[in-house]
Image: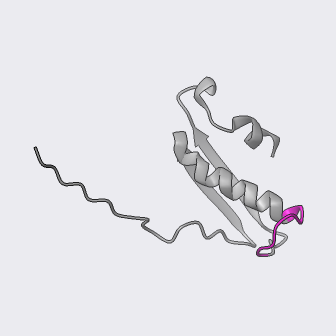
């Protein structure tokens, strides 16, 4: 038995947040990990532990996450503390 598999990606522009504006993200399940990585990078930059772009005074990240239940959530405690 022979089968073909085609894989494409990544597609789109990737994460390019507005460094001096409001950014809104929607995600569910394990898709939230990309945004958690962004939150970690922002935190490191703000704390001076990582070089990177400067965030303007109007920077804001609004993150909407969806999970089947709290027990199945990923990094919910981290997000709540931010």
Q: Residue at x 42, y 67 (%)?
A: 11
Q: Can residue 28 be seen here?
A: no
Q: Can residue 21 be seen here?
A: yes
Relative to the observer, which residue lies in front, 68 or 6?
Answer: 6
Number of marks in the rendered image: 0
Placement of 44 over or under 29, stated as above or below: below
Image-quadrant location for residue 65: top right
Q: Position of residue 43 (x, y in %)?
A: 81, 57
Image-quadrant location for residue 8: bottom left
Q: Residue at x 81, y 46 (%)?
A: 82
Image-quadrant location for residue 22: bottom right
Q: Position of residue 37 (x, y in %)?
A: 67, 54
Magenta span contains residue 51: yes
Q: Main secondary structure of the magenta part?
A: loop
Q: Position of residue 64 (x, y in %)?
A: 62, 46
Relative to the observer, which residue lies in front, 36 or 55?
Answer: 36
Placement of 57 over or under 30, stated as above or below: below
Please provide the residue range marked out in magenta: 46-53
């Amino acid at each position: 038995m022979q089968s073909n598999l085609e894989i494409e990606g990544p597609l789109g522009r990737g994460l390019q947040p507005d460094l001096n504006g409001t950014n809104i993200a929607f995600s569910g399940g394990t898709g939230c990990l990309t945004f958690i990585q962004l939150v970690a990078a922002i935190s490191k930059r703000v704390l001076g532990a990582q070089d990177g772009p400067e965030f303007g005074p109007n920077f804001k990240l609004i993150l909407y996450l969806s999970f089947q239940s709290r027990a199945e959530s990923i990094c919910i405690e981290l997000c709540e503390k931010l």
